[in-house]
Image (spheres, helix red, strand yellow):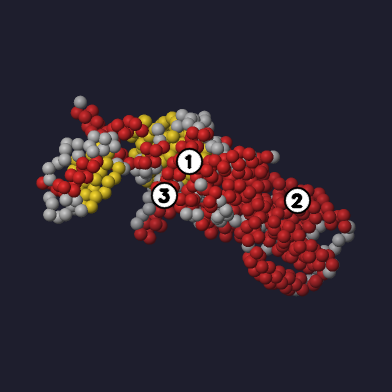
Amino acid sequence: MRWLRRYKPFARAAAIDMMAYRFNIITWAIVTVFEVACMVFLWLAVYQSSEGRMDSSINGFTYKEMIVYVVLTTIFTFIAFNDDTLWLINRDVREGTIGNFVIKPISYRGKFIASNVGAFLMMSLVFGLPLYAASLATLIGIGYLPVISAWDFIAHFLLFLVASVLACLLNGAISYIFGILCFYTTAAWGLNALKTTVVSFLSGTLLPIAFFPPVFRDIVSYMPFAGMSQNPVLILMMKYDYLECAKVILIALGWLVLLELIGKLLFNHAIKLVTVQGG
Amino acid sequence: MIQVQNLVKVFRKPVRGKGLFGMIATLFSRKYTETRAVDGVSFDIPEGEIVGYIGSNGAGKSTTIKMMCGILTPTSGKVLIDGLEPYLKRRVVAKDIGVVFGQKSQLWWDIPLVESFKVLKEIYQVSDADYGERMAFLSSVLGIDEFLTQPVRTLSLGQRMRADLAASMLHNPKILFLDEPTIGMDVLVKDKIRTAIHALNAKYHTTVVLTTHDMEDIENLCSRIIMIEKGTIIYDGPLGDIKRRFGNIKTLTLTVPPSVDPNSVPPFSNDVTMTVEDDKVLLSFDADKVILEQVVQYAFSQYHAIDMKIADISIEDVVKTILSQQEEEHAMAKKV
């Protein structure tokens, strides 16, 4: 495990960087309060106009569950999706700084994984802990998130932590693949927009995947995106039994291995195209 | 230690049309212009040698260096560092090499220099004892301890280059690639850098490959010279041979008043060649054969020079001369 120590500086630097963006985080908090409020009113309107009114269940979600889902998904994406992998790769390619990493005994991918993990740990400790504690206490307190057995809740919370780490790594792997495409095109902005849209749509961040049309829904739930936001949140909400938890975690793990493999093959091809300007 | 075998690097650039229409056409066309930046280069460098890899701008020096350290993948041919191809075994080879690009710093811009070194210490897994010993050595030869606690962005060009050089030596690489390490440096910094390279080579037996435009760098450091022009090697041999071939050539550039016609002045001797460029008169001669002082006196008394400048032969001149000599040889061979 000694070789892991080579990556420690990158994890540490990313963690420190995260704290350097305190002001961004304040603006995020303000924007988010309004966004969550909008979603709450939207779902309120949806459920009120449905046949069973507020007691109805739409695609397996009651009104209360929907609100819990919106709140927890918002916090989850804030904590787990912190990576500027795509922009950093784009900069390394444009400015030729990629050479600085190629000549060092570290893997380019490993550097980004270390950064992702460092940022994730810092965000989880500084913001995740208080945000989850406050929101879960409130949601359980007002009866929106019923807890039947404390042990059941703790077990699901631990599974949620595992799924969170996988979600962070999946997001990093997808960013990395999109980032490597910067070797082939200068359209980094477009790539990033594409990645963000695809992820937020297919991961269930905008809308639970259960709301999609039947066949599409089944396909999407087996794609890697489901494990990036919807599945961890549903584990935390105890919507999955242990067998389903194990299933979605294993699917996420399988995708992670596959995506890392694709990223590696893509990088091995892309690096041959590098032409460093000047001399 | 380093083997380069028939190395070729071809850069392909899409042909771009003119104007807006041409730009749109480029999207659909697959035409490329090919540049053979490095075209069949071969050489061997044994351990502990300091080699000057020289040539004029765009000759293919940096491209070769980048292939030797694994940044670029050759189009054909190969590079072997201790028997391994660096662009295939990046992480293994990276431990054994140190690289400095004069134009690009590889230090972390915003953090104090000493923090950059600590990051490198972890990346290269340098032990505490080795780190202490090397830092002491590098501080003494490069004088980096004066600015060790400053962020890299606040360093002057000379300080930054010394820092970059120290950073590349921290893990005690077997081979050091230096791409124009003295570019834009003043005399004192150049001197420090040269001393450091010498000290490193003497202490750790490090193999050094450096590119430079500075004749003094070569005279001070290199025992062997490889000269490249338009992607092919035009000279590979000891520094002494080049010196014997070109001697200690100096050029006096004189500013002559309009009243003097330089062509009517009798030549100093057959060993001094005179060329006229606008209002300047250039006198070139071998300082080992002709006494400099006498030429200077002659310039003042016969040409009535108002101003003068003394310069050593430049790399560009050497390249030009070698090329023209080769052309002559070719022409001779054809006649025979």
Q: Nearer the viewer, mark 2 or mark 3?
A: 3
Residue kind at label 3, given as amino acid type: Met
Look at mark 3 in the image and give the residue it sits on. B185
Position of B106 compared to A30: left or right?
left
Position of A244 compared to B259: left or right?
right
Q: Residue at x 84, y 55 (%)?
A: A154
Look at mark 1 in the image and give the residue it sits on. B196
- Discs 2 and 3 share one subunit: no
Residue kind at label 2, given as amino acid type: Val
Position of A236 compared to B220: left or right?
right
Image disc number at residue A162 = 2
Q: Is residue B231 visible?
A: no
- Crowding at dot 2, Cα within 10 Å, few <14 / some 14-19 / many 20+, comes out as few
B39 vs A119, nearest the viewer: A119
Q: Residue at x 10, y 46 (%)?
A: B264
Label 2 element class = helix
- Discs 2 and 1 share one subunit: no
Q: Residue at x 54, y 45 (%)?
A: B139
